[in-house]
Image (cartoon, rainbow, N blue to C red):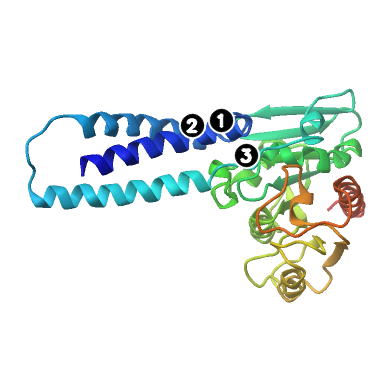
């Protein structure tokens, strides 16, 4: 048993080292929850490694069985920690993080806020990242909205999971009382959570959600009659994760007036800048071309909204 505990402790230290060495930038710029878990895991594994080599007398069978259960739980914990390893933002998203005279970018441990430097609109956007994706990966594709005068808030989700950031919209609204109309949106799992926010806050007094913007995403339940906001669903025709069939099926779950725009040749990972994603399709257009199309159709959609 001590050998198994020692091996698991070494494996845990290896997982932590692997995550830090390969995704350090994303961990540092992400929500602190994941970094804290990595640190606590490393500390726990060091203690377990010391304990596994510590001389001790024979133990009862029940303690051996309990230790075995603990080893199984630790193995599951390490597998989950490895799965949570984030996708790191790449160019041009990293360069888009720089502020200019017309776009002011502010980063905090819990989010990224882009504010127009001149003539800001009373409409803002809260955009939820896809699962485990570095929040910075969406800055370049959403920056055209800020250039046009719209404030954009990108939450940093705990552990990179949108369902752990369900209060992000309310937090953004409270922080920006000058904005009277909101668009909630998201990529992949982030869009699913954004759809929930749209349904829950469409009739709020002040800071109303007026529109839902989906990137390679769809709602988790039928909102065809309960959602009264404008909806734009942008998808890639070669998306291997939110497939064209998935998007087509989502028509029944969204209002009849929802707009659907396919980007021909685009894949799931083209809705952000974080490199290729396992299980995705093979694109037939360039990422730059897809980004430009997605950015333009998003801008046209937000610009078409009539303030309430």
Relative to 222, 50 lies left or right: left
Q: CA distance from mark 3 to mark 2?
A: 22 Å
Q: Quadrant of residue 258?
A: bottom right
Q: Which residue is mark 3?
A: 156
Relative to 155, 2 lies left or right: left
Across and down, in percent, residue 138 comes to 75, 42
Q: 59 or 100, which lies in front?
A: 59
Q: CA distance from mark 1 to mark 2?
A: 6 Å
Q: Is there any visible trace of residue 233 in the rendered image?
A: no
Cβ atoms under marks 1 and 2 closer than 8 Å: yes
Q: Identify the residue shown where x is 42% and y is 45%.
A: 78
Q: Which residue is mark 1?
A: 21
Q: Which residue is mark 2?
A: 17
Q: Is there any visible trace of residue 221 in the rendered image?
A: yes
Relative to 190, 42 lies left or right: left
The mark that comes first in sequence, 3 or 2, is 2
Q: 251 or 210, which lies in front?
A: 251
Local crowd at mark 3 within 10 Å, few (<14), some, or many (≥20)?
many
Local secondary structure at mark 1: helix
The label number, if any, that marks residue 288 in the structure image: none
Q: 142 or 245, which lies in front?
A: 245
């Amino acid at each position: 048993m001590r050998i198994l505990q020692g091996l698991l402790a070494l494996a845990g230290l290896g997982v932590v080292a692997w995550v830090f060495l390969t995704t350090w930038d994303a961990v540092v710029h992400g929500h602190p929850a994941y970094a804290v878990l990595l640190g606590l895991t490393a500390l726990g594994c060091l203690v377990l490694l010391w304990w596994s080599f510590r001389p001790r007398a024979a133990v009862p069978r029940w303690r051996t069985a309990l230790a075995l259960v603990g080893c199984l739980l630790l193995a599951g914990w390490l597998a989950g920690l490895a799965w949570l390893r984030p996708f790191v933002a790449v160019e041009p998203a990293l360069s888009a993080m720089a502020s200019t005279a017309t776009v002011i970018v502010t980063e905090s441990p819990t989010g990224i806020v882009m504010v127009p430097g001149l003539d800001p609109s009373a409409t803002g956007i809260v955009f939820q990242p896809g699962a485990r994706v570095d929040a910075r990966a969406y800055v370049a594709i959403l920056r055209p909205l800020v250039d046009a005068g719209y404030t954009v808030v990108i939450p940093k989700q705990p552990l990179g999971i949108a369902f752990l950031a369900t209060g992000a919209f309310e937090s953004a609204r409270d922080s920006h009382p000058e904005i009277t109309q909101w668009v909630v949106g998201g990529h992949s799992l982030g869009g699913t959570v954004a759809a929930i926010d749209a349904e829950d806050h469409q009739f709020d007094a002040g800071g109303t959600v007026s529109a839902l913007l989906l990137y390679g995403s769809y709602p988790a339940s039928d909102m065809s009659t309960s959602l009264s906001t404008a909806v734009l669903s942008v998808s890639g025709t070669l998306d291997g994760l939110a497939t064209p069939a998935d998007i087509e099926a989502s028509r029944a779950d969204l209002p009849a007036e929802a707009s659907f725009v396919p980007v021909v040749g685009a894949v799931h990972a083209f809705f952000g800048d974080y490199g290729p994603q396992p299980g995705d399709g093979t694109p037939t257009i360039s990422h730059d071309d897809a980004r430009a199309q997605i950015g333009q159709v998003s801008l046209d959609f937000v610009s078409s909204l009539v303030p309430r």
